[in-house]
Image: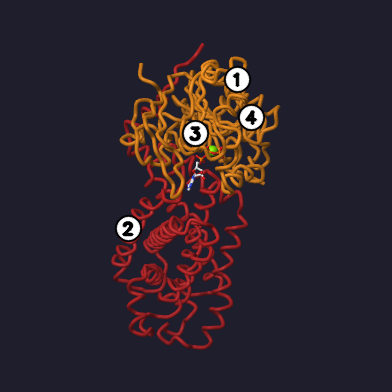
Amino acid sequence: MSKKADVSPSVLANRRNPVLLYFYHMIVIIELETIKMMKDPTEILSRSLQPVIWLLLFGEAFSRMKAVPEAGGDYLAFLTPGILAQSITFVSIFNGLSIIWERDMGLLQKILTTPIERSALVLGKMLASTVRSLCQLTVVLSLSFCLGIHLQWSIGRVFGLLGFVVLGSAFFSGLSMVIAAIVKTRDRMMGIGQLVTMPLFFASSALYPVSIMPGWLQFVAKANPMSYLVDGLRGLLLDPVYAHGFLDALVLLAATLVIWALATRQYPRLLT
Amino acid sequence: MEPMIEVRDLCKRFKDVQAVQNVSFDVKAGECFALLGPNGAGKSTTIKILITLLSADSGEAKINSFSIKTAPYRIRESIGYVPQSLSVDGALTGRENLMIFGKLYGLSGAELKERVPQILEMMDLTDSANRPVAHYSGGMIRRLEIGQSILHHPAVVFLDEPTVGLDPIARNTLWGHIRDLRKQYGMTLLLTTHYMEEAEVLCDRIAIMNRGRIEVMGTLNELRKKAKMPKASMDQLFVHFVGPSESGEQGGLANVKKSRRIAQRLG
Ligand SMILES: Nc1ncnc2c1ncn2[C@@H]1O[C@H](COP(=O)(O)OP(=O)(O)OP(=O)(O)O)[C@@H](O)[C@H]1O
Ligand SMILES: [Mg+2]
């Protein structure tokens, strides 16, 4: 008996609710990335060593120099949110690498011939890198606890932290997708990835307060989304009052939305 | 009845190559249509335009009566695609690869749970379903990819060199699977191949492309008539229509790399 080749009933059911299908697709992409991550935990583990090294080696040594009096005497505490922001940026910026890899594998092409909206694919990818960043968050917080660094704690602050981590990693992985669509090859992506993250890192308040920078660098730091991530994390972890949290979050959210739109537009260029 | 695939004057140019030039053809519902042609003839490019991966410079095409220009999203719901180069995720198991694509095609719940084992069974992959695909043989990977492409029971399946790099036994097995598919679901197939026998065995009609154009099109017997070679094999017909000096001249390094990569890809 031959069945009629037709669109499945459930595909039809989904078509009636495109919003649901949109989120379903986005979650599938996150699922795919997470499964892959779990299969090769060495990558996550080695990445999470990075903030440990920064805090233990650089932080411990540098804090003795008392070079940053603005940090209020506890440089390690000052540094912790900076290093957290840095490690989020670093794990996210290499998201573009995996996209180029998937393009080379032919997997991307095949995904793009399924009925997934481009923007849902991009958003899924951006949010998937959140999973990696949450590992970094866990590592940095556990370490600072072990080192006896004094941090502010409350339920609200934890949710705030999660929010900033999600926004920060979504922004930087979106940025890396835009870069990937422009540079198109893995080798160039490796180089450019490094090239982009370094200035972002040094032109932010991750290692030192903005106030000690020369005027032009302060200007760059103001335009640098990483500053808002650092500022947000630092406010939540250290500042007992932290009044301008909404502003930081808003700037980061706006930047993320812009990069999402940009990545959705640029992404198909990877194919040509 | 409207044809399932309708292509009119399709053109596509890359910087210095006219990859597809005024290509027109129809494929009826349930038919199997083969695109033959030497390396670089424009077969894959034609397919990529039809499956909405590339946009055409000019011309029009309809799949399942949806236009590539105005309804690419509808087309994606109606098609399955097996790319020329391998495209599964080596880190995932066969089952995971199927699950993910089933979901991308919009399947969920009980239906998805039912389809995946069905497809595994149909493609003889049930025993290796839980092994990472990186350990699969070339034939198994191809069967998995075909399985992925038909999870949602598409109206049309595009197979770009489905048997490239397979040994004769694996190739024969795959042919059997493709025939079963047609019998069971009545799907419309468009495939490209460099194996003349494959087109002869599987397909109802054949088009021969060269330098972006379709040189000739028809059933095997019609091609023989056009060539005035009533006893000719498909091989002879191919040489007759393409010309003996053409083969392999247009692909270039990129193409050779592409097809060679397949063997080492997943390791
Ligand atoms: N993305 C691209 N950029 C530039 N040129 C391209 C691109 N894709 C294909 N081409 C060129 O277009 C022509 C047609 O390529 P296509 O891949 O369609 O050939 P094909 O018939 O599938 O060949 P093969 O049998 O080797 O797979 C070739 O000359 C190829 O080099
Ligand atoms: Mg090809």
Q: Mark 3 or mark 4, which is nearer the start of the sequence? A: 3
Specify the amino acid type for callout 1. Answer: Val
Q: Residue at position x 32%, y 39% from top?
A: A19
Secondary structure of the residue carrying numbered label 2: helix
Which residue in the protein does label 1 denote?
B201
Q: Which chain is red?
A: A
Q: Are marks 3 and 2 on the same chain?
A: no
Which residue in the protein does label 3 denote?
B81
Of badges 2 and 1, nearer the viewer stands: 1
Q: Is residue B198 left or right of residue B112?
A: right
A77 or A118, which is in the foreground?
A: A118
B255 or B16, which is in the foreground?
A: B16
Q: How far apart are marks 4 and 1 (CA)?
A: 24 Å
Ligand 2 image-quadrant field: top right
Specify the amino acid type for callout 2. Answer: Val
> Which chain is indicated by disc 3?
B
Q: Distance between the residues labelled 2 and 1?
A: 53 Å
Q: Which chain is orange?
A: B
Which residue in the protein does label 2 denote?
A258
Where residue A53 appears, as percent x and y from the top left, is: 58, 72
Other-residue count near label 2 (Cα within 10 Å), few / some / many at <14 / 14–19 / ≥20: some
- In the rendered image, the quadrant that contains the N terminus of chain B is top left
Does the beta carbon at disc 1 come under 8 Å from ligand 1?
A: no
Other-residue count near label 3 (Cα within 10 Å), few / some / many at <14 / 14–19 / ≥20: many
Which residue in the protein does label 4 denote?
B125
Can see residue B160?
Answer: yes
Q: Distance between the residues labelled 1 and 3?
A: 21 Å
> Which chain is indicated by disc 2?
A
